[in-house]
Amino acid sequence: MTVAVEDYFQVGSFNRLIQRGEWYRFEPRVEANTRRALDLLDEFGVRGTFFVLGWIADTMPELIAEIARRGHEVASKGYYHRSMRAMTPGEFREDLARAREALRRASGQRILGYRVADEWLRPADLWALDVLCEEGYEYDSSVCSVLGRFASEPWRRFAHLHQFGERTLWEFPISSIELFGLAVPIAGGNWYRQLPPWLVRRAVDHWTRTYTTPYLMYFHVWELDPDPPKISAASWIQRVRTYRNLDRMPDRIREYLSRYRFTAVADHLGLAVQTQPPPSPKRAAPAPVPIVRASPKGEDRRLPATIVIPCYNEELILPYLANTLRSVEEKLGDRYRLEILFVDDQSSDDTYQALQRLFGEKANYRILRHSRNLGVAGAIATGIAAAETEVVCSIDCDCTYDPHALGEMISLLAPAVDLVTASPYHPAGSVRNLPAWRLSLSRSLSRLYRLLLRHKLYTYTSCFRVYRRSQVLQVEVRNTDFLGIAELLARLDLAGGGIVEFPATLQVRMLGRSKMRVLETILGHLGLLCRLALVRLTGRQSRLRPREVTAAGSVVTAPTEQQSV
């Protein structure tokens, strides 16, 4: 019995979508899911081998200690959820050592076994077994015969001893059967959820009747999660592979636990793993407090700034946003005194209640709510009007742009600049995992706006911006939906405002759904372009009030009445 301990956002099929540096943003569920797995095995008195990421051991050592305390073996799945094919032999050794030490420290056990985190070994990858031998591992479980793989070496379908010089290593492959001359895995996990249950049952019964070598079973702890957050950026095939039949997985595992006797790999080999009692649970250290740099007189010299976040039916992504904002405050808090202002655009789900629950007790957070739905531009306008600082930023609730970049963007708000806007299509910018049709549409719209406006930008529709509040409040914007984002920039441009473009990275939305209606948005932009062209031809655009630049470089403007939305 083997169990893979990883979280729902660390799934192998999502490796290209979710970078390791973004793991901290996701709401962790691995702890609850691992306890579900432990309870399930306890229900049948089964001891198993838990293949754990070293990153999880360093992040949640008390969870790994509980696995050991409840009588199970802890083995290695590498440090990060990373394919060994992306590593050189030297990097592979370093990853093995780092993960082994983290797991040993957290569990109090000798770490004897290894399984690859992603992509089962192919014939060309068997050099990894030699490295495991040299590093003193007793066994591996990374080989899987799929279709014609290892067809010339059929014995690799069964447990066997790998020899490297004078060292040996047991290999416990993922169990498979031959079907029409091809190998079909029947070990559990994805195969339990995708293949017909009757076929897997018959195959396992055939295995136990026919072979003396042990049948190896596995599942991932996230497969026991009744309702995991869905990665909306995943393709259709990725969603099928990851989410299909999750609700049936616990009962399918129970069926095999009740019919067969299972044990841990180390127990099967007669190896002792415990070297010391598992560490006692430790209370988590408090979150770091942002550093405040004060003058010798104790005066706070940080620049005050407001971050406006429009929210409409964003309940699912708010924990992701909360983790991101916590990091932003920690990393920018020594330079900026940040106020976070949420504007709930009359959401129809529980967004407003979730905002109150997550942020309502924080002193520098405010939550506003529209009495009716206006749209993203209307929500941002409300936030700008309600802000009490001259520097106001707006970000997307889904963090498709990294909010940490605001530190650099604010620094570009020079005296003659009224708006800094992010651009993924700038030569120094980039996009990740966006569909080609969306890139083509955005670039085509940008070309049309570039023909019309003074500032020749690469992107005109980004919500990720920094504003000079006093100047932006003078701009009259008619559209309050997605069009209002481009309209604000365009009217500021036509009124003589200063605009700077910041190259940024745009990635696909991870959780929840986009609210943009594509055809409606395209037609709306074309209509807006026509109206703006008429304004430019007739010269009817009002000018911004002149600004007086002080010797210190700050901008002074006459007071203005707050615009209503």
Image (cartoon, grey):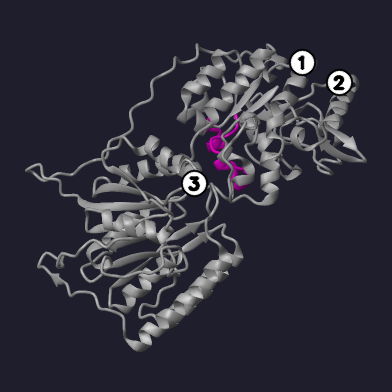
Give the image quarter of residue 211: top right
Considering every residue shown, the one lying at the far left of the view is 297
Q: Amino acid at mark 3?
A: Ser
How far apart are the two marked residues, 1 and 2, measured between alpha carbons? 15 Å
Foreground pick, 99 / 444: 444
Residue receiving disc 3: 348
Classify mark 2: residues with Cα within 10 Å, few (<14), some (14-19) or many (20+).
few
Q: Is residue 196 above or below residue 159?
A: below
Q: Amino acid at mark 1?
A: Ser
Q: Position of residue 14 (x, y in %)?
A: 60, 46
Q: Identify the residue shown where x is 30% and y is 37%.
A: 362
Numbered disc 1: secondary structure: helix
Residue 470 relative to residue 218: left or right = left
Q: Position of residue 442 (x, y in %)?
A: 52, 69
Q: Identify the residue shown where x is 58% and y is 27%.
A: 33
How far apart are the two marked residues, 1 and 3, measured between alpha carbons? 45 Å
Classify mark 1: residues with Cα within 10 Å, few (<14), some (14-19) or many (20+).
few
Dividing the image into 4 quarters, which one contains the C terminus?
bottom left
Asked if residue 168 shows in the view, the reply is no
Residue 44 relative to residue 180: left or right = left
What label sits on residue 258 in the rendered view?
1
Q: Is residue 394 above or below residue 160?
A: below
Q: Identify the residue shown where x is 72% and y is 30%.
A: 248
Magenta segment boundaries in residue numbering: 76-99
Foreground pick, 475 / 335: 475
Residue receiving disc 2: 208
Is residue 53 rendered magenta in the image? no
Q: Amino acid at mark 2?
A: Thr
How far apart are the two marked residues, 2 and 3, measured between alpha carbons? 54 Å
Q: Position of residue 199 (x, y in %)?
A: 86, 32
